[in-house]
């Protein structure tokens, strides 16, 4: 298995533009998580899904952020409109099941909003 | 807010020495995990310890958990230059499936 795959690896955009980050979890994993990492705030959970259903989105900063998981092999995190304070590394992670709590992380998307 | 806080924030040792990192958390947990992150990369799972366990070993790693003090420690024995990375503790607290990560310890192992 190729592991958790995220795209793009780097994204540079201008304030006000829409940004879409993509994630392909490991096949067979029931849980998918989106995290954001910054120097100031560390790793923050944004949202997570179980069997494609959003379970907890309390970490989503504001309405500008939205996440979807249309099927078991794909998820998106969208920011519209983007702002400079959204600049961060966004990680997607997946785990096998409720009884197997180990997370597998993707390589992340480095987002820079100018 | 972050569930776990780690200390030290940074640690520099010589190859062959042991490295100890500590993590404290605030509420009851189901398990506590340690992850490693190399610069510019994603996190990699190292070891998981459940709330009813006190100690666990994996290769050169030793993790302890003291639920009465709400703290854990990660010991890396006989460190190598390749162990240079940031190390994070993460807690799955009761009632929430997702992990909450600590602030991390940056470990530098000098060859």
Image (cartoon, coloured by chain):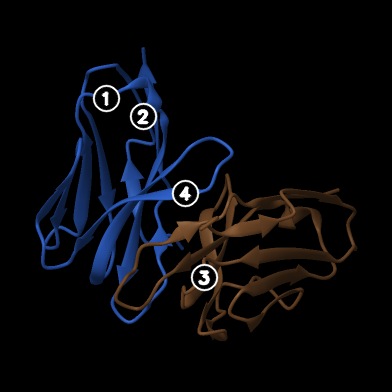
The residue drawn where x is 90% and y is 63% is A16
- Chain A: drawing colour: brown
Q: Which chain is blue?
A: B
Q: Are marks 2 and 1 in contact (CB under 8 Å)?
A: yes
Q: Position of residue B4 (x, y in %)?
A: 35, 56
Q: Quarter of the image holding residue B109?
A: top left
In primary-sequence order, the first of circles 2 and 4 is 4
Badges 1 and 3: C-beta atoms under 8 Å apart?
no
| Element assignment for label 2 | helix
Q: Crowding near pointer 2: few (<14 within 10 Å), some, many (20+)?
A: some
- Mark 4 sits on what residue? B43
The foreground one among A58 and A31 is A31
| Observer-nearest of B5 and B90 | B90
Residues beneath discs 4 and 3 located on the same chain: no
Q: How much space separates mark 1 and mark 3, taking CA atoms?
A: 34 Å
Q: Which residue is mark 2?
A: B83
- Mark 3 crowd level (few <14, some 14–19, many ≥20, 10 Å Cα): some
B59 w.r.t. B63: above or below = above
Closer to the chain start, of discs 4 and 1, is: 4
Q: Are marks 4 and 1 in contact (CB under 8 Å)?
A: no
Q: CA distance from mark 2 to mark 1?
A: 6 Å
- State which chain disc 3 sits on: A
Q: Are marks 4 and 1 on the same chain?
A: yes
- Which dot marks residue B79? 1
Image mark for residue A27: 3
Q: Chain of mark 2?
A: B
Snapshot quadrant of residue A91:
bottom right
Quadrant assignment, res B29? bottom left
Q: Secondary structure at mark 4?
A: strand
Question: Above or below — where is B36 with respect to A29?
Answer: above
- Give the distance between the C-alpha atoms of the residues marked 2 and 4, in whole angstroms: 14 Å
Q: Nearer the viewer, mark 4 or mark 3?
A: 3
């Amino acid at each position: 298995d190729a592991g958790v795959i995220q795209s793009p690896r780097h994204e540079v955009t201008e304030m006000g533009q829409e940004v879409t980050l993509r994630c392909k979890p490991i096949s067979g994993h029931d849980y998918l998580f989106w995290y954001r990492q910054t120097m100031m705030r560390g790793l923050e959970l944004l949202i997570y899904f179980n069997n494609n259903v959003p379970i907890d989105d309390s970490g989503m900063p504001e309405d500008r952020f939205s996440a979807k998981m249309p099927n078991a092999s794909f998820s998106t995190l969208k920011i519209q409109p983007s702002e400079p304070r959204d600049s961060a590394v966004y990680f997607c992670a997946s785990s096998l099941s409720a009884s197997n709590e180990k997370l597998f992380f993707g390589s992340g998307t480095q987002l820079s909003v100018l | 807010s972050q569930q776990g806080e780690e200390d030290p924030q940074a640690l520099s040792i010589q190859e062959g020495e042991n490295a100890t990192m500590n993590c404290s958390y605030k509420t009851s947990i189901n398990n506590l995990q340690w992850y490693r992150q190399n610069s510019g990369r994603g996190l990699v799972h190292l070891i998981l310890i459940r709330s009813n366990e006190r100690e666990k070993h994996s290769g050169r790693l030793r993790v302890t958990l003291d639920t009465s003090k709400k703290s854990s420690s990660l010991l890396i024995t006989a460190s190598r230059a390749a162990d240079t990375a940031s190390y994070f503790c993460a807690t799955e607290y009761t009632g929430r499936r997702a992990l909450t990560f600590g602030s991390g310890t940056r470990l530098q192992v000098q060859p």
